[in-house]
Image: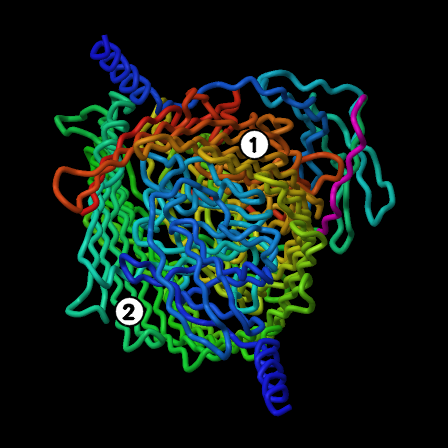
């Protein structure tokens, strides 16, 4: 009897223990470099419960006790299955081995129908490096343009427009520090070095509450920390730049560093301008850039680290024009014009991340971000009578210091809380002009705009909860409050955020999302060339913060090897600004509001579809977007809606990657989109007593450029070098394979409509070494 | 064979690369039917109404003629019809000589033409009468051999504090009663009507200005015997028109600007400008002691 009683008791205790729940948590890192892996997918093969690692490589999964088999995967690492007997809360460290990927996807390894957040895409640097790139330089911003809902600026330029938003409406973060200009070299290259990027999270809707300050999209970039085990590096040479990366441990395996630098090869640009110059003038254009990234990370323990991240980038453009107009009285008369343009970006992040236990972690730090531009224009005119020198220096800058705290608390399996606080202090100089004139031996110096520095403060606090309502229903509910304090006025801006996912079948999900976003920084730009004066201004009594709300709903799923998604959205914007550029009179620099049309409204809506087909050696992704984007201002076109510059009715993008033997890959990207809108006159007013005649326009953006389409191809081959631990690679890129003369912009010269194609066909070769 | 093929590929790539940067090329764009609307440029001053009526033309055929028939122009005061303007020439219409506008009355014009929509201007009231104080002029440099002179011309006028005001100052040179076209590009006093300024910097105060200008011996004129200074006190409509015209010309000067700046118009169903002004003029003999 006693034996029976003891036996039954043991069975009861064991079964009771197995019916209880415990958590498995820990970090996933690379076996070779010990670098934490972001976005790794962990699933319990029995219950199908799953999770993914966060930006610090940490995961937590709550399961019923018992024998568990967990599958751990990531697009860049070999799969691993671990077996564990779960009886209590357990902390594990999992190391994945890297491999040469034979499977490439633009989106995450995690099936899109399983993600709660609608409109989120994860980009991996190894994926981007195998896509065709402009002049051989892999670019984050251009890689994003293959995603439905995202369109690029004039093709070749790194600006992106997301669902009708402008390029300054994208929040770009690099290790928690915001970026105010993402362009190098007229926008043909972005400031992001793909070799130091670990992970890119991109949101075009359903923004988590931890993000704010922009109204269109979020691009959250995390950089590598450096290999903690071995010192290694990479060198690459391509037509656009030479770049160098080195990383490794510093002293011991607790501290690591990574350093990367790029230097532009401007010889090609200079060669092309010299070939096209007018023989009567001597016009030269020189452009170059250089940038560097550096990061230092120290691990006190696996859960406790401090990091220091630094970026510095500078662009130099130089335009020189000399026109000889003949000679008079033995004096050679000539006019010389010079324009020097300097643009710089500086970012510093000092942060600390600590995980106190499996439930609670926090990340806090301080960031500094600075963007500035300076244009120096010199006009020198030598005539018989006099030498006239006019020198104008125009500059603007924005500086941003912020303190942030982000915390996460996961106590029960159904809830994952995130909350945090951010304090921003800005210093914005919209425009400062220094005019120096020398004429008739008289010199004058005048400075305009110096009293127009703005110093707003921004406080934001947020909370969000990822809730597993049921096994097939999850939601992310968040709220963000932002208090903006300017010299004249304060704004309290609430921003609710909501995402919802309902798994209707085994592999099909319906998702919906709603977000409100505000933006207190406005960008005024006079052209889309990516150079010239870009004026940042802050909100005040005249210009209130931009506001947008977006609602979206869609369905996504998987059928065999095919993944699909259909999503529709509607977005409303208000308090938009429209900059009617004119030559700024120095005396009105402190109040250039007359050039700004304000209180505009905008609306954009559309439907986006994606299809991804994964086979053994080929991955094909098709994305199609049908969309509208319109703006309206009371002072323009009688308050009628007009198509915004970002409007692209149809946008089709097909990407294809083929994996061949001997580590060769071929990537293709085909882009087809409706032409951009532009403005054409509808009539002409002949010369009269009050004018010499002028064109009249029936509205803004009343015409369309021709259809744009282009095919880019990339070939990459990797092989082992003769020396040990040395790998080499060769990339061949062809931009615009069939050399279509697409219209990058168009204008009317009075007689004929002119089309300008910046680059028609561009093959490039790049060579690199990993050591 | 492979060697030759590779060579040709390289040559082809280099050729395509070097021609890949094009200058602009022409595009055949299907243009929409050009708008045909009436264009009015004119003013009402303390003495008369002066209107020039044209029509818009095809933007790609700017030298084509206006196609105007049956044009009539009417003047309204406080929404009541006053009279039909008299046609002085093919495009010019003026008020009868007996007509004198009255302060405080809102005037507007309406115009019709065969096959055009009727147009109507915004209402305009005469601005306040502002007059020059007596200007002064003196010779500051001269070269008798070349009969060239440099003058310093000073003038002033008192702005009224009550209303927002806008001004244009023009200078005309005369010899023997004939107006000479001023070809000087340095002088602020050119006949360019774009130089319209507001009274914000000197509201209610005396506006003073001095300007140097030169007179050189040219053509058959030995010297200028008189200078006419005109002060136009204009309505805000003209200020907006002249500013937008200047902005428009700047925006046309470079293809880099994304959007052209439209020229301001206060003509309903048409284009152009109708404004009010008060003109004060004074004559100066530069050589009179």
Where does residue A4 sit, x and y in percent of width and height? Answer: 63, 86
Tell me the chief SS of the magenta region. loop
Residue A425 picture location, percent across and down: 42, 74
> Which region is colored magenta?
B115-125
Query: Above or below — where is A756 with respect to A129?
Result: above
Q: Residue at x 29, y 33 (%)?
A: A717
> Which residue matches tag 2?
A308
Q: Measure the alpha-carbon separation of dots 2 and 1.
A: 42 Å
Q: Nearer the viewer, residue B114 or A626?
A: A626
Q: Which residue is at a point 70% across and 40% down the rendered structure image? A: B48
* Residue A673, numbered circle: 1
Q: Is residue A336 visible?
A: no
Q: Report crowding for label 1: few under 14, some 14 to 19, many 20 or more residues within 10 A (C-alpha).
A: many
In the rendered image, which quarter contains the N terminus of chain A? bottom right
- In the image, farthest residue toward the top: B1
- Residue sticking out furthest to the right: B80
Instruction: Tell me the subunit letter for badge 1.
Output: A
Q: From this viewpoint, is residue A727 visible? A: yes
- Look at 43% across and 26% down and name the residue there: A757
Q: Which mark is residue B120?
A: none
Q: Nearer the viewer, residue A173 or B86?
A: A173
* Comes first in the chain, label 2 or label 1: 2
């Amino acid at each position: 009897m006693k034996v029976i009683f003891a036996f039954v008791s043991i069975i009861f205790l064991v079964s009771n223990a197995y019916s209880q729940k415990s958590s498995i948590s820990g970090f996933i890192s690379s076996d070779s470099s010990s670098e934490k892996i972001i976005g790794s997918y962990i699933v319990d093969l029995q219950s199908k419960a799953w999770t993914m690692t966060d930006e610090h490589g940490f995961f937590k999964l709550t399961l019923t006790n018992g024998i568990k088999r967990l599958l751990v995967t990531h697009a860049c690492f070999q799969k691993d299955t671990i077996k564990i007997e779960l009886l209590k809360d357990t902390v594990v460290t999992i190391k994945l081995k890297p491999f040469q990927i034979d499977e490439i996807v633009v989106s995450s390894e995690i099936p899109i129908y399983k993600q709660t957040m609608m409109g989120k895409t994860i980009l991996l640097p190894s994926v981007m490096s195998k896509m065709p790139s402009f002049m051989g330089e892999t670019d984050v911003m251009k890689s994003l343009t293959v995603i439905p809902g995202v369109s690029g600026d004039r093709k070749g330029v790194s600006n992106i427009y997301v669902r009708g938003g402008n390029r300054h409406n994208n929040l770009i973060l690099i290790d928690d520090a915001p970026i105010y200009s993402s362009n190098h070299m007229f926008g043909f290259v972005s400031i992001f070095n793909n070799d130091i990027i670990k992970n890119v999270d991109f949101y075009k809707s359903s923004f988590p509450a931890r993000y704010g300050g922009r109204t269109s999209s979020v691009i959250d970039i995390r950089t590598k920390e450096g290999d903690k085990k071995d010192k290694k590096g990479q060198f690459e040479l391509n037509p656009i730049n030479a770049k160098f990366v080195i990383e490794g441990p510093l002293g011991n395996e607790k501290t690591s560093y990574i350093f990367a630098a790029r230097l532009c090869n401007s010889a090609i640009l200079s060669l092309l301008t010299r070939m096209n110059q007018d023989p009567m003038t001597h016009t030269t254009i020189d452009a170059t850039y250089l940038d560097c990234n550096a990061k230092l990370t120290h691990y006190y323990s696996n859960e406790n680290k401090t990091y220091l991240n630094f970026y510095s980038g500078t662009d130099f453009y130089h335009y020189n024009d000399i026109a000889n107009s003949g000679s008079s009285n033995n004096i050679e008369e000539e006019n010389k014009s010079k324009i020097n343009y300097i643009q710089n970006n500086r970012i510093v992040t000092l942060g600390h991340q600590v995980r106190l236990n499996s439930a609670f972690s926090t990340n806090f730090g301080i960031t500094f971000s600075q963007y500035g531009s300076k244009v120096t224009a010199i006009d020198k005119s030598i005539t018989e009578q006099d030498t006239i020198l006019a020198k104008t220096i125009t500059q603007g800058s924005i500086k941003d210091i912020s303190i942030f705290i982000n915390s996460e608390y996961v106590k029960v399996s159904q809830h994952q809380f995130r909350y945090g606080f951010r304090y921003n202090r800005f210093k914005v100089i919209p425009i400062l002009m220094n005019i120096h004139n020398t004429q008739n031996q008289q010199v004058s110096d005048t400075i305009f705009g110096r009293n127009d520095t703005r110093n707003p403060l921004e406080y934001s606090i947020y909370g969000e909860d990822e809730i597993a309502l049921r096994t097939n229903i999850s939601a992310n509910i968040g709220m963000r409050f932002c208090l903006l304090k300017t010299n004249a006025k304060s704004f309290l801006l609430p921003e609710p955020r909501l995402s919802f996912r309902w798994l209707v079948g085994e592999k099909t999900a319906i998702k919906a999302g709603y977000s409100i976003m505000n933006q207190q920084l406005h960008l005024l730009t006079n052209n889309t060339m990516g150079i010239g004066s870009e004026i940042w201004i802050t909100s005040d009594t005249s210009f209130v913060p931009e506001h947008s709300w977006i609602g979206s709903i869609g369905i996504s799923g998987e059928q065999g090897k095919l993944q699909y998604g259909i999503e529709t959205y509607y977005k409303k914007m208000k308090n938009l600004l429209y900059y009617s550029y004119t030559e700024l009179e120095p005396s009105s620099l402190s109040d250039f509001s007359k050039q700004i049309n304000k209180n505009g409204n905008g609306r954009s809506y559309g439907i986006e579809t994606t299809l991804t087909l994964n086979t053994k050696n080929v991955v094909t992704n098709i994305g199609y977007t049908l969309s509208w984007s319109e703006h309206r201002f009371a002072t323009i076109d009688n308050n009628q809606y007009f198509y915004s510059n970002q409007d692209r009715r149809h946008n089709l993008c097909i990407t294809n990657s083929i994996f061949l033997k001997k580590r060769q890959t071929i990537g293709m990207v085909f882009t087809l989109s409706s032409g951009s809108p532009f403005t054409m006159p509808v009539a002409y007013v002949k010369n009269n007593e009050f004018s010499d005649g002028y064109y009249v326009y029936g509205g803004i953006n009343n015409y369309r450029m021709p259809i744009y389409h282009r095919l880019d191809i990339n070939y990459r081959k990797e092989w082992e070098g003769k020396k040990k631990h040395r790998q080499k690679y060769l990339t061949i890129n062809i931009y615009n394979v069939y050399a279509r003369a697409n219209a990058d912009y168009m204008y009317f010269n009075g007689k004929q409509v002119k089309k300008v194609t910046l680059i028609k066909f561009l093959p490039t070769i790049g060579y690199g070494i990993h050591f | 064979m492979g060697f030759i093929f590779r060579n040709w590929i390289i040559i082809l790539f280099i050729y395509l690369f070097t021609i890949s940067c094009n200058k602009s090329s022409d595009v055949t764009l299907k243009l929409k039917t050009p708008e045909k609307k009436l264009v009015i440029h004119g003013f009402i001053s303390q003495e008369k109404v002066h209107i020039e009526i044209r029509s818009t033309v095809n933007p790609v055929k700017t030298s084509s003629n206006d196609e105007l028939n049956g044009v009539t122009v009417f003047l309204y005061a406080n929404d009541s019809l006053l009279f039909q303007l008299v046609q002085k020439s093919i495009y010019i219409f003026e008020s009868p000589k007996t007509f004198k506008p009255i302060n405080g009355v809102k005037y507007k014009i309406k115009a019709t033409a065969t096959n055009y929509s009727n147009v109507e201007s915004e209402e305009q009231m005469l601005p306040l009468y502002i007059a020059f104080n007596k200007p002064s002029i003196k010779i500051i440099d001269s070269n008798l051999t070349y009969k060239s002179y440099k003058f310093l011309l000073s003038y002033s006028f008192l702005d009224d504090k009550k209303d927002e005001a806008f001004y244009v100052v023009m200078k005309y040179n005369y010899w023997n009663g004939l107006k000479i076209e001023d070809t000087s590009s340095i002088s602020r006093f050119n006949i360019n009507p774009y130089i319209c300024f507001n009274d914000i910097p000197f509201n209610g105060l005396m506006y003073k200005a001095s300007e140097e200008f030169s007179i050189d011996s040219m053509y058959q004129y030995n010297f200028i015997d008189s200078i006419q200074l005109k002060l136009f006190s204009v309505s805000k409509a003209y200020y907006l028109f002249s500013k937008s015209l200047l902005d428009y010309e700047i925006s046309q000067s470079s293809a880099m600007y994304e959007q052209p700046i439209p020229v301001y118009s206060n003509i309903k169903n048409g284009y152009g400008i109708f404004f009010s002004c008060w003109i004060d003029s004074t004559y100066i003999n530069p050589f009179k002691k």
